[in-house]
Image (cartoon, helix red, strand yellow):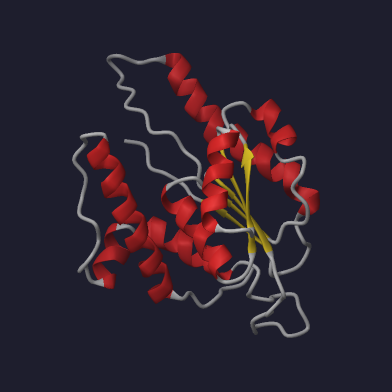
Amino acid sequence: GRAVEVDAERAVGLLRRVRVAQVVVAEDQHRPVGGSGEGVEPVELLSRHRAAVLAVAAWIQIGRSGAASPNAGADLNLDSITAVVIGGTSGIGLEIAKDVVARGDKVVLSGRDLARAQEVAASIGENATGVAVDLSEPHTIREGLKDVGTVNGLVLVAIERDANTVRDYDVDRATRLVVLKLVGYTETIHVLCDRLVPDGGTGIVLFGGRAK
């Protein structure tokens, strides 16, 4: 790999939009959350949400870095690239999908429910397509992605939130999350591996998490 120059200002702008969306969702569910990010200095955002910013910033570079092209180090300026965003119906995945389409590229976004994924894709624009992928059911992933063609970038941000304590430990819920994050992520890359354009401008972003 090689280091790429991150457009931090654009990344922070995306993160601000994501945090506003998170506040709206949390208020609907009557759960307290942090502020919207508006008025917060970029340095503070980078410190408090470093993982999210880096994930977005890395994605911004995918398909545009041209590491293995004849003009390495310069923007490719391709007519269009195609990105796949697993978990693109809400949160940071949705903001990334919007950004891809806004710059004139194509995005395939996934959600567990096909109708919901297609509805979200339609709201973004004609360059967005919705598909159904449930990472907790790895054997179904290949079928869900069967119509996806050539891929210039893959972003995996899908995750489920679950407050599973040691005292009230639910093995089935814990197993579902482990399968989703470890087996589901890996199987998705495996399924799309032969469709990823084999050059330095193609990338994969894994949005991690932190166990508490």
Q: At 69% from the left edge and 69% from the top edge, which residue is drawn? A: 201
- Quadrant occupied by the N terminus: bottom right
Q: Position of residue 169 (x, y in %)?
A: 35, 16
Q: Nearer the viewer, residue 164 or 14?
A: 14
Q: Nearer the viewer, residue 171 or 111?
A: 111
**Quarter of the image where one finds residue 202:** bottom right
Measured along the vertical axis of the image, is residue 16 above or below residue 187? below
Q: At 61% from the left edge and 33% from the top edge, which residue is drawn? A: 183
Q: Position of residue 27 (x, y in %)?
A: 23, 41
Q: Is residue 82 left or right of residue 114?
A: right
Q: At 51% from the left edge and 29% from the top edge, which residue is drawn? A: 178
- Is residue 156 visible in the rendered image? The answer is no
- Is residue 116 visible in the rendered image? The answer is yes
- Quadrant occupied by the C terminus: top left
Q: Position of residue 198 (x, y in %)?
A: 78, 62
Q: Is residue 20 left or right of residue 3?
A: left
Q: Is residue 144 left or right of residue 181?
A: right
Measured along the vertical axis of the image, is residue 123 above or below residue 103? above
Measured along the vertical axis of the image, is residue 157 above or below residue 170? below
Measured along the vertical axis of the image, is residue 7 above or below residue 145? below
Q: At 56% from the left edge and 50% from the top edge, which residue is drawn? A: 121
